[in-house]
Image (spheres, grey):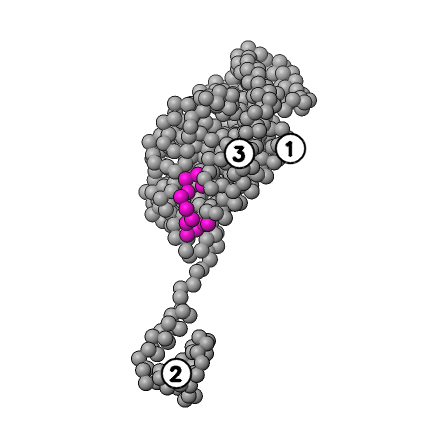
């Protein structure tokens, strides 16, 4: 072999690795038929130059709709490889238009299932053009980001009502409704799956509870999971469980982004932990709902566990007892709600002080979990009524009514950011400018985020030294 000829060196190595004997004789043959050598070299070179798979880090940013400069939104792109060319889209609607806040509750789900997230900073409660705004947001994101055909909508409270309304006449792959629902005929008319997450102390819980108590009335496309207690965005884990169900129940096979078998294994393990925790606390309603939800996912590991647990819960007398207690607590709640609503026009602040102190004591001392949740919902209902009556009184300049409802509001929810904001607005309207700044600061520190509204309603002299960046 000619040590100066690199072609012969490569060929020698190739034949040695292949296990050929009598290499020197074969070398002579190949020297005479040298035509094959370029092909061998090409194979060796191409094997070393195949495109590598690159990893992309997650991205969280703010963007603006090209067709509406006023519509900003938060975007989250999960970590992924270059093989993951297109990802499903989840549009998120927060009732206060706080897309940057809401989107953080969805990052765990985005990383697990490789969702791209878009959370509107424009669409909020009482925004009448929400349908067109959501359409523009979807269109804008599909133009700018690697989004596939699957589109999901998620909303909380008023945001849930908006996405449920949007779903009536738009093609979607699923809807996540948190903290609010709709009537049966509305849900029946939606041509996709709906996953409802509700806290047991949420004042909107009765909307969900009606379908738990009267199971035959529950729409076939509705899945329910009880998550947490209060009226707030559910935890990232609960949101991930809900969006995971919507995705996996409709996912046909592996994608370039995730392995379905691996994700199903993790999903089943998480579901099993949730059920085990519920079993330890004798929460039979939740056990039944969660197990039946899990069983609707094809090829789910641990299927026998969820099937056996569901059958056991269905036949357990404790389930009927829990449903009976829930029904009685709701009847009590409806009665007290009506009485409190009527009392706003007839009872003075002394009565309200005594009544709310008594309500707080009953919540604290109640040993019955079902009744404690009912009492908490009653208190939350009072907060909503205070918000509504105060807002209406201030908008119509009925300042006497506003003064009374504000005092009740402070008793019911002493740390509520809207209550602080309304006090500032009340003092603006009554000419007590020296009290405004402290209440605006308290509102912001407690979580008030609608600075657009604040700038419209208060003179610049009030907020220019208070708002960040102003």
Residue 104 location, x and y as percent?
A: 51, 42
Q: Quadrant of the N terminus?
A: bottom left
Q: Residue at x 49, y 20 (%)?
A: 214
Residue 231 location, x and y as percent?
A: 54, 29
What residue is disc 3 on?
307
What residue is disc 2 on?
26
**Magenta residues, start to end:** 248-259
In this orientation, which residue lies closer to the viewer: 58 or 307?
Answer: 307
Residue 108 location, x and y as percent?
A: 52, 44
Residue 323 higher or lower than 142, as above or below:
above
* 3 or 2: tag closer to the N-terminus: 2
Q: Main secondary structure of the magenta part?
A: loop
Secondary element under disc 1, as helix, strand or loop, is helix
What residue is disc 1 on?
280
Q: Residue at x 62, y 35 (%)?
A: 277
Mark 1, Cα crowd under 10 Å, few <14 / some 14-19 / many 20+, is few
Q: Quick check: can you spot residue 195?
A: yes
* 3 or 1: tag closer to the N-terminus: 1
Mark 3, Cα crowd under 10 Å, few <14 / some 14-19 / many 20+, is some
């Amino acid at each position: 072999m000619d040590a100066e000829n690199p072609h012969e060196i490569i060929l020698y190595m190739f034949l040695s690795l292949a296990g050929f004997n009598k290499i020197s004789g074969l070398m002579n043959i190949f020297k005479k038929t040298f035509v094959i050598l370029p092909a061998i070299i090409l194979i060796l070179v191409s094997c070393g130059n195949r495109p590598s798979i690159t990893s992309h880090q997650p991205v969280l940013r703010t963007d603006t709709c090209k067709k509406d400069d006023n519509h900003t939104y938060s975007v989250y792109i999960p970590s992924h490889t270059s093989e993951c060319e297109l990802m499903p889209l989840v549009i998120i609607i927060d009732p206060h238009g706080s897309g940057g806040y809401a989107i953080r509750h969805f990052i765990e789900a985005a990383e697990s299932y490789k969702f791209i997230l878009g959370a509107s900073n424009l669409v909020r409660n009482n925004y009448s053009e929400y349908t067109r705004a959501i359409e523009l947001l979807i269109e804008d994101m599909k133009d700018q980001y690697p989004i596939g055909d699957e589109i999901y909508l998620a909303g909380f409270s008023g945001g849930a009502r908006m996405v449920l309304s949007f779903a009536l006449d738009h093609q979607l792959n699923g809807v996540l409704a948190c903290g609010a629902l709709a009537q049966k005929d509305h849900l029946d008319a939606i041509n996709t799956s709906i996953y409802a997450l509700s806290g047991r102390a949420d004042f909107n819980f009765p909307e969900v509870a009606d379908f738990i108590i009267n199971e035959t009335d529950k729409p076939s496309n509705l899945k329910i999971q009880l998550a947490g207690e209060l009226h707030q965005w559910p935890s990232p884990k609960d949101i991930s469980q809900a969006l995971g169900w919507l995705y996996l129940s409709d996912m046909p096979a592996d994608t370039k982004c995730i392995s379905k078998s691996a994700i199903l294994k993790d999903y089943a393990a998480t579901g099993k932990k949730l059920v085990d925790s519920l079993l330890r606390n004798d929460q039979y309603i939740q056990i039944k709902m969660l197990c039946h939800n899990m069983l609707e996912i094809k090829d789910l590991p641990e299927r026998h566990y969820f099937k056996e647990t569901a059958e056991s819960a269905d036949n357990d007398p404790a389930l009927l007892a829990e449903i009976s207690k829930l029904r009685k607590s709701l009847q009590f709640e409806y009665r007290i709600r009506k009485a409190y609503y009527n009392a706003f026009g007839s009872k003075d602040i002394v009565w309200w002080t005594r009544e709310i102190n008594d309500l707080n004591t009953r919540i604290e001392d109640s040993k019955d979990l079902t009744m404690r949740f009912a009492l908490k919902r009653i208190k939350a209902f009072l907060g909503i009524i205070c918000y509504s009556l105060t807002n209406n009184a201030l908008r119509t300049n009925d300042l006497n009514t506003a003064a009374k409802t504000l005092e009740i509001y402070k008793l019911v929810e002493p740390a509520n950011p809207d209550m602080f904001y309304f006090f500032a607005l009340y003092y603006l309207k009554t000419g007590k400018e020296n009290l405004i700044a402290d209440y605006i600061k308290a509102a912001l520190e407690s979580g008030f985020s609608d600075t657009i509204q604040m700038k419209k309603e208060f003179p610049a002299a009030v907020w220019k030294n208070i708002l960040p960046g102003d």
